[in-house]
Image (cartoon, rainbow, N blue to C red):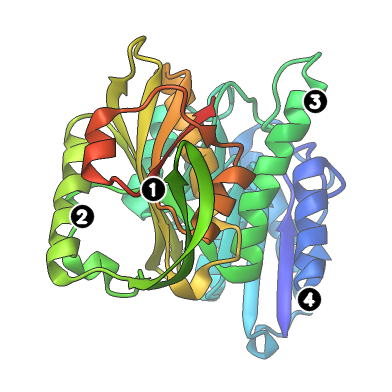
Amino acid sequence: MKIAIFFPGIGYHCDKPLLYYADKLCRQSQYETLRLSYTNLSRSIPEAFEQAYAQTEAQLAHVNWNTCGDILFVSKSLGTAVAAAYAKRHGISCRNIYYTPLAETFDFAPQTGIVFHGTSDPWAQTAIIEEKCRESSLPLHVIERTNHSLELPQNAVLENLRILERVMAFSEMYIAHGIYYRLLCEKELCRSLFDGFIRRQQVVKCWRRENGQWTIKDAPFIDDWSEEDYKLLIKCLQNTIQTGGFVYGAFCGGTLKGFTSVEAAFLGSAKQYLDLSCIHVSQDLRGQGIGAVLFQEARNWAKKKGGKKLYISAHSAVETQAFYQRMGCVDALEYDQHHVEAEPFDRQLECIL
């Protein structure tokens, strides 16, 4: 039996956007859902917690946890502390989605899950949430400028819908496939990190530039990495982090299944480009939308860094080029000669940020 329990916050009930759409995603993935509700909560966090916890115990008293093979707790605000406390006190092994947790949530050693936090949340300081997530090894999605509801101020309706879509995309991948995303740190970049990653790509046709025109040619080969390739990759990713760049990974069941990197140094005559130096998804999880998420997060980082465009020296395989086209990439207006010389068969692309 698959069951998802929804823990609301103070004034944020289960019909509000984050919990409402998360409920739909759970039902879509064949979870039985149970929505909790709280009444007459104090405005004092300690008192409200005790009141909400008591109401949770009463509402979940009928659940036989032994019959539940897959348990997911989806919680918001005060509800994140209640969910963490309930799981700990009852010894329940579950996955979690923590929407805008309070600092107090982490007092209960929260179990595995993903966390969403807004930098303008008046109920929780970003620095504290980031530190607590690092200590608990919880992947954290920080949504810039958003409040305790992961929304921007008034008159930003369309942008708020885009934020909600992004949050739900991450939520769906976690709900349906257990896939989550986080920044990679230098100390974890070693060969064992890639033990469950399958680089293999069977290529049949590639794009080739002839007489100034791009055409599709038969070019069958299998692209894979040797141990020397892995050593070089690890060294390059470590250097990216050391020099202030971006290295971001996708995980499934704790195993790295995709990653991307963007270099910190600007390219181009007007310093308009930031270099998307790599993006890869393990063969066994291609087609799940992981590459699109990695690409979008790379774009978000590059835009925040001040870039105008991403520069991509892209593998010429037809499937790879189709992916970049879907991401909005076009032929670069200006070529970086270092990339052209290093990979003469690559197609040089750009993507406006």
Q: Is residue 215 above or below residue 2?
A: above
- The residue tagged 2 is 233
Name the spot of residue 203 as percent of width and height, x first: 44, 69
Mark number, residue 158: 3
Name the spot of residue 2 as percent of width and height, x first: 71, 79
In primary-sequence order, the first of circles 3 and 4 is 4
- The residue tagged 1 is 260
Marks 3 and 4, how far apart at CA = 30 Å
Residue type marked 2 = Leu
The crowding category of the residue bearing disc 2, from other C-alpha atoms within 10 Å (few below 14, some 14 to 19, many at least 20), is some
Judged from the image, the secondary structure of the residue bearing numbered disc 1 is: strand
Q: Residue at x 22, y 33 (%)?
A: 338
Q: Is residue 41 above or below residue 43?
A: below
- The residue tagged 4 is 30
Position of residue 226 in the picture relative to residue 166 (left or right) = left
Q: Classify the position of the C terminus by image quarter.
A: top right
The crowding category of the residue bearing disc 4, from other C-alpha atoms within 10 Å (few below 14, some 14 to 19, many at least 20), is some
Q: Residue at x 84, y 46 (%)?
A: 39
Residue at the extreme top: 270
Q: Nearer the viewer, mark 4 or mark 1?
A: 1
In primary-sequence order, the first of circles 3 and 1 is 3
